[in-house]
Amino acid sequence: MTFLSRTYAGWLVLVAAAASAGLAGCSKGGATGPLPEDAPTDFISGNPSGSNDSAGEDGGSVGSAGSTGSGEGSGAPDEGADDDPERAITEADIIQVKDGTLYALSQYAGLSVIDISQRDRLSLIGRYRASGMPFEMYLRDDIVYAMFSSWTQYLYDADTGEYTYEESSRIEALDVSDPSNIRLIGSFDLPGTLSDSRIVGDVLYAVTFENNYCWGCGSSPNTTVTSLAVGDPAEISVVDKLSYKDDDPYGYGWRRSVTVTQDRMYVAGIEWNGGDDEGHSTIQVIDISDPGGDLVEGTSVEAVGQIQSRWQMDEHEGVLRVVSQPGTWWNNAALPGVQTFTVASSQELTPLGYTELTLPRPESLRSVRFDGDRAYAITAEQTDPLFTIDLSDPAHPAQLGELEMPGWVYHMEPRGNRLLALGFDNASAEGSLHVSLFDVSDLTTPTMLERIHFGGSWGNFAEDQDRIHKAFTLLDDLGTILVPYSGFEVNDDKGCGSYQSGIQLIDFTTNTLTKRGSAPARGQARRAFVHDERLFAVSDQEVGTFNIDDRSAPVEVTDLSLATIVSNAVTTGDLVVRMSADWWTSGPQLEVVSAADPARTEPLGKLDLEALTSASDVECYGSGIADARLFAHGQYAYLLWPSYADWTKTHLAVIDLRDPESPRIASQRELPFSSRALYWYWYGYYGTAIPTGDSVVQAGSTLVLRDADDEYYYDDDGAQVPAPAKARLEVLDLSDPSNPAHRSVALPSGAGHTGLQIDGTTVLTSHWVPLPEDPSRARFYLDRIDVSDPSSPVVRTPVNVPGSLLAFDRTSGRALTMDYQTVEFEAADFIACYATFGRAEFLPHNQETREGRGLCRGTSHTLKLVDVGAETARLRDESPLDDNRAISQVFVGDDRVFLYTYVIYTTGSDESPESPYGILVASGLEEGSIELARKPLADFSVGSPLLADGTRLLVSSSNPPSIAVLDASDLDELTFETKAELSSYVYRVTLDGDRALCSLGHHGLEVVDLGN
């Protein structure tokens, strides 16, 4: 097979799809000349809400714990007891520090290289982005070996001529000798998902696991160990691979845990055969004694129970010791067992000793740690016993002591006769996380000397048990523990509270723990270390430094963004305004950047928006402003966001951008209307009305929102139906930024109203009124509201039109509408019903089985073009649409209306059925007759339309993430072209000329050139 880059493959696939799909061609209506005098002016349509006449609205110590130095990697705890310096064991991490330089691997930003040589100054000097999800890295001889999971690419099969989408892991060797020009010098694909890795001597060993659920993975679970020679940067190469299947026919296993010595590797993970069989683990032994990296499969031994972390396996002085528990996580009736094996070689392990742990009650094994001739085990249900185990006679392991305590321990770090532990205790009012200090000088009577709680009501750590020791940092020279954490602090009995993230500082001595302050982090805190008398807090989003002269009150000195969260962006003049919100700390932020470089990580200026949220909002749902609607005009930005404390209110803020480096709040106001006015699509449309428009439109410094009282009631049959709705426009005059003005204007009453559109300073919408004599039919009306003077909006006379408004052209005075007619017929079954009508309701005669024949009630759609006058409209042209295609979205451009259509069922009569997904393009506002063209999209199910601009439609794809353009400038030749692949899925898109500013959430903002 041949590897193909994602960009080229994606382009080729889309071009091939476009060529094979072809064009459905254009169809034109017949009305092109003057209208006859008897053209219809009175229009009655099918009621899109059904026959009910009350329809509603539309809807320093980098590496292992205990280390205090920073260097090119860290030693592996409890590993490498042979002490051969040429065979030193090194573990990977997400950060490395060398010669005043910090290398940080972020999930969102890839590799960042930061100069930290000058105190209180952080400087980004290099960056490398990659496609996959960063895992960990090594740093050796100015080469970073960066490991990625979820690496996606297209593979070309020369025999079949087809491409397949594959997901794997990858190691990339990066030359960072010149951080400003990081060079890829080698890449190596690995099957499945990364479990763990080590460097032993000059060989990097990577362990991956395929569980048959990832794209292109093997059909049965298997583990692969790959060795790479890294001794000579100029000769990096794969030395050997060893794969073996796992005895797990149901595929329920997951990633492997790894323990390594200088001669061998132990690999194990949970296996479960289903049924009544107990969960268990097979420990595979692999001989890695060859300095060149050759792998030799050794023997395997059966653990009595599950291996869920690396700490359950340990080789010490020729003996493999294992602690595990039979059963599954939901069945902990079996007792944990301690096993020992004599290790003669990697091919020969002999059972030596065994004992079961005596538990006070049925509990689950939570954590294990070996320390020379000792072992410690933690089990938990609601309380958390610590068991001490004597392994001085490995043939006769002995349980000596037991200590019960609340909560449970996640990880343990031995310190001679003391044991430091990190854990959880959700029942504690002082904090759900804890650090504990135990006296284990007498194994028969372990005692807890101290426990410190922190982390809020619900706390968590970013790392799993195999990697938590890299985050739980003990600085022995300072007598301080650094714990990165995230959590949620509940502030009342309703569950309201706020998110938090940071580094908890705890001082320790032989017999005491003292809680100090917490250094806040933006983003989920993952690592902490001390360098040049400063505390460094590292998340996937940011590096921050703190003065900890007073460890009870860390003071932030400086910070550097690694990644920017961008949920939305707008342009105004030569500036781009970005909305940034952090899930972990609920810290919303507005950032201002130059339009010449809108994707830059460091903004020109930023404004913390936390002060805008009311206390009740912050305490209950974090910050509602995180998903605010964002607008801009001139030198001001406008924010609208919901009030979570009171849904009858909406918040407004005006931001002054006149000094881009110091944006400030010009004014803020609570508005007296419901937050639902911001997001009408939350509520959707009732019935079959086609969704168009938005709930908020902008005309310069005027914002207009559409609000409606959407209520439900139950009819006599108990069915939930919408009650009558009262709609109104909320007009916001922001021409005086310091004093926003609000006016509410009632819309004509009706059973429902469509979304808003804007044409200059005229707001357009439509509503429908059921006929009193026949509620299954309705009259639609076009509504036009002049907001040129926002202090006195003018509602013009509604004009009866044939159906709901799709688009309006002020120059020609024409409107394109969608008419509805309800059709009922006897259908053989529900498939026959939905194969006939894309929008339908099937009522089976057999209500018990709901199978067989029944009444199909479908909706036919017809596009209609009308000339609109001051009080009446005249039909100019019409074009019926295919009944079997449903319309889910509508986007309006310049004399182009794009309708996203799909087919639910086909009859199967077509031997070569067309793609069920497609775009129908309608034109005619300028020429005076309807013209249609349709573009089938074979792979459109993986994406969705974003917005219309002129005669083109922007489309996002999710597999892989990308932006494409449907060009409808020539309806006889529609073209579809992928413009760029993206780092992640698109949240929102803003256009700036021929540039698409794509907001990608935690992956920042990317700019796509839409030009030719």
Image (cartoon, grey):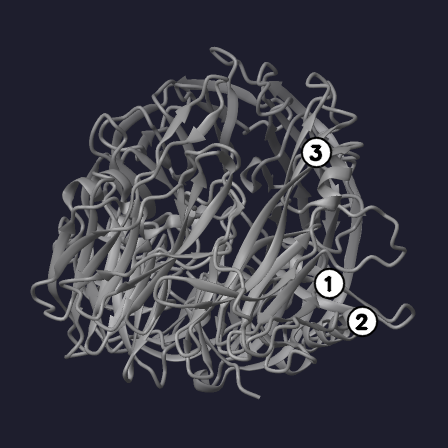
The residues bearing labels 3 and 1 have C-alpha atoms spaced at a distance of 40 Å
Q: Nearer the viewer, residue 946 or 979?
A: 946
Q: Who's the residue at 63% across and 30% down the image?
A: 306
Question: Which quadrant holds residue 644?
Answer: top left
Q: Is residue 194 in view?
A: yes
Q: Who's the residue at 53% across and 60% down the image?
A: 40
The picture places residue 512, in percent across and down from the top left corner, at 22, 35
The picture places residue 187, in percent across and down from the top left corner, at 66, 73
Rate crowding at label 2 as few (under 14), some (14 to 19) or many (20 or more) other CA atoms within 10 Å: few
- Hey, what amino acid is under mark 3? Glu
The residues bearing labels 1 and 2 have C-alpha atoms spaced at a distance of 9 Å
Task: Name the residue tied to disc 3.
Answer: 271
Mark 1 and mark 3 in contact (Cβ < 8 Å)?
no
Indicate the secondary structure of the residue bearing disc 2: helix
Indicate the secondary structure of the residue bearing disc 3: loop
Which residue in the rendered view is the most extreme toward the left?
A: 739
Count how many numbered circles sit on residues in the image.
Answer: 3
- Tell me which label, 3 or 1, sits earlier in the chain: 3
Task: Name the residue tied to disc 2.
Answer: 20
Task: Name the residue tied to disc 1.
Answer: 938
Image position of 733 with respect to 882: above or below: below
The picture places residue 312, in percent across and down from the top left corner, at 57, 35
- Tell me which label, 3 or 2, sits earlier in the chain: 2
